Amino acid sequence: MKPPILIIITSTIVLGTMIVLFSSHWLMIWIGFEMNMLAIIPILMKKFNPRAMEASTKYFLTQATASMLLMLGIIINLLHSGHWTISMIPNPVASTVITIALAMKLGLSPFHFWVPEVTQGIPLSSGVILLTWQKIAPLSVLYQISPSINPNLLVTMAATSVLVGGWGGLNQTQLRKILAYSSITHMGWMAAIVVYNPTLMILNLAIYIMMTLGTFMLFMHSLSTTTLSLSHTWNKLPLIASLILALMLSLGGLPPLSGFIPKWMIIQELTKNDMIVMPTFMAITALLNLYFYMRLTYATALTMFPSANNMKMKWQFESTKKMILLPPLIVASTMLLPLTPLLSIMD
């Protein structure tokens, strides 16, 4: 893709999300979503092959259906309230329809089927945009309408998302699919807390974006898309392999790392709201995620490649990609736990 075209498309994606973030009018929010959806498709099809085309088509159909449902919810709300302002949604039907539309856009269960398929079919550089930037707009709308959402609906979707995200990733060897299932799980954690403490959802989103961005950058740097290619990293780039190990465990939410902060605070907040079963269930299913991250770290860092590589010739090319923000991202993704008291004061 030529640089001017790439700049125009990227700025349209950013503008679409910004319109959603800063609008208080439902129609403008819908237009922002549409701009974003139409502009991301060329990014998904950057490497033009049948697999990418299929992934882009699946993405388009799902997002178009979600946009249609969103507009339906907006119109029902307009008929009952008489205004377009994004505020309390008095009608339960409108609230439910809008919540389902946003869940489809986010890839919450039971509308999660497109996430692994689309992520697997596109390049790593497009996958990182799909799993990070594309989550910001729907979550911002959920944040704004959180007082009107039916808690039972969202908590049910959250519980199934956490379960599906853990269960689905178990037998995967493709790294992009593993990160897609990880994304479904994290969206489940965010959906669980948005009704009770929306600020915690923002914190979870920020930490999730940093961790996912760092992980994708390391995969792009080591040119890995499968567990097998990742297991070759240890022989060639031992430092990168160690960093992938740390980031994977952080994504799983292991205590001394940053990924533990949102899980800890969400479990605490849910128990404050007299919910015992839900946080217990979520903590147990988080072990499924931790298992497949542990399997990846085992493949990456604890298994040596069969032959010692003493040859003069390089058997794998050096990566020429410059990863600018990698050091601060890795530090933020692994070492933020001491800041938890400060973050809890901000909540």
Image (cartoon, rainbow, N blue to C red):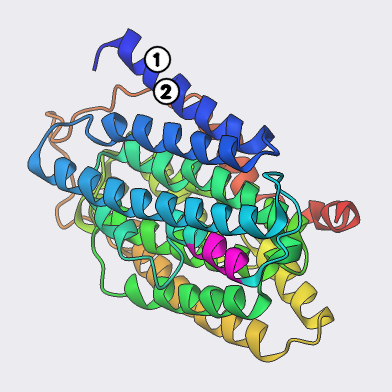
Q: Residue at x 66, y 91 (%)?
A: 277
Q: Residue furthest bottom?
A: 277
Secondary structure beneath label 1: helix
Indicate the position of residue 102 as horizontal and vertical percent values. Answer: 51, 57
Q: Looking at the image, how many numbered discs can be counted on the residues?
A: 2
Which residue is under mark 2? 10
Judged by its main secondary structure, the magenta piece is helix
Q: Residue at x 58, y 86 (%)?
A: 281
Residue 239's quadrant in the figure? top left
Query: Vertical placement of 319 versus 259: above or below?
Result: above
The disc placed on residue 7 is: 1
Query: Vertical placement of 28 versus 247: above or below?
Result: above
Secondary structure beneath label 2: helix
Q: Residues within 10 Å of mark 2 (few under 14, many from 20)?
A: some
Quarter of the image for the C terminus: give it: bottom right
Most foreground residue, 148 or 267: 148
Left-right relation of 266 to 141: right
Query: Vertical placement of 49 versus 92: above or below?
Result: above
Indicate the position of residue 310 as horizontal and vertical percent values. Answer: 17, 39
Magenta-drawn segment: 93-100
Q: CA distance from mark 2 to mark 1?
A: 5 Å
Q: Residue at x 80, y 51 (%)?
A: 339
Indicate the position of residue 127 as horizontal and vertical percent values. Answer: 35, 43
Most foreground residue, 30 or 19: 30
